[in-house]
Image (cartoon, rainbow, N blue to C red):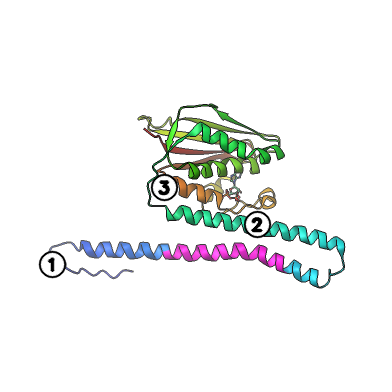
Amino acid sequence: IATVAPFGGEAGQPAVAALITIHDESEQHRALEMRTDFVANASHELRTPLASVRGFIETLQGPARNDEVAHDRFLKIMAEQAERMTRLIDDLLLLSRVEEKANLNPTGQVRLSELLNEVVRALTPVSEERQITITVEPESSPLVAKGERDELFQVFHNLIENAVKYGRVGGSVKVHLRESERDPSKKRVAVTVTDDGPGIAPEHLPRLTERFYRVSTEHSRRIGGTGLGLAIAKHILTRHQGELSVDSVVGRGTTFKVSLPKYK
Ligand code: ADP
């Protein structure tokens, strides 16, 4: 889109209006391209489990019609695939709701230690299944963040759930809450979520918040997430003037850090 049209530009005057138009068009073009990619990726992600369900239906109607053992096994797989589609659709809807609000400033106030303890309680069934101990430190703190409670719940839920899902069975997840050390004006708070799991190789780190990006390990594949959790977290944090960063050592573990503006 390089049509420089210096309309209104009299001799000696810069064609500011023309520059603004060009910027707008390329932004729009990029947004459209991203949307097209997103729809293509989302369709592909939904098509895969759907194709698997259709394949099993055909097998059950045909060759495996009278095979009771195959019936049980295939129905179990079909139920899992249907569950995967539900998870994908739920996450896609959540992402689009978050995007819709991208330009609204959050106004609420959230007591972070209460919120974090609530997230941990909600994740008890998953952490017990993997025998992982989650601790929140300090358990009670007066720190309050500026933001929408439900959305921040979602951010910490995604991060702590990942630490449990990808962490080491029998390991520990530590959640720390404090005033941001790097902020001398003390206007920000920082929450870190640290696991002692397998870690993430450095080449993946910059791409983790891309939609549908998943690190392909045997364990990740078995877990079958949607690849949208960190993209959702990043979107919510952007609208909250928050930041998300990650630090990981393969074989040692991973720390995700969230920083948020304090409420007063
Ligand atoms: P998913 O639904 O796959 O969990 P996310 O966007 O939440 O999607 O995470 C993207 C990928 O980042 C995951 O598939 C996983 O490979 C990797 N990941 C996220 N958190 C961790 C962690 N704590 N330890 C190891 N890998 C992680």
Q: N-terminal of the two: label 1 or label 3?
A: 1
Label 2 sits on residue: 84
Q: Quadrant of residue 42?
A: bottom right
Residue 198 place in picture, x, y as percent: 65, 41
Please tell me whether residue 227 is drawn above or below residue 240 in the rendered image.
below
Which kind of residue does numbered mark 1 sit on?
Glu
Label 3 sits on residue: 239
- Is residue 167 left or right of 178 when viewed as pictured? right
Which kind of residue does numbered mark 2 sit on?
Arg
Mark 1 and mark 3 residues within 8 Å of each other at the beta carbon: no
Which kind of residue does numbered mark 3 sit on?
Arg
Which quadrant, please, contains the N terminus?
bottom left
Find out whether residue 135 is within the magenta segment: no
10 Å crowding of disc 1: few (<14), some (14-19), many (20+): few
Residue 108 place in picture, x, y as percent: 41, 40
Q: N-terminal of the two: label 3 or label 2?
A: 2
Label 1 sits on residue: 10
Label 2 within 8 A of ligand 1 by Cβ = no
Q: N-terminal of the two: label 1 or label 2?
A: 1
Q: Residue at x 69, y 59 (%)?
A: 81
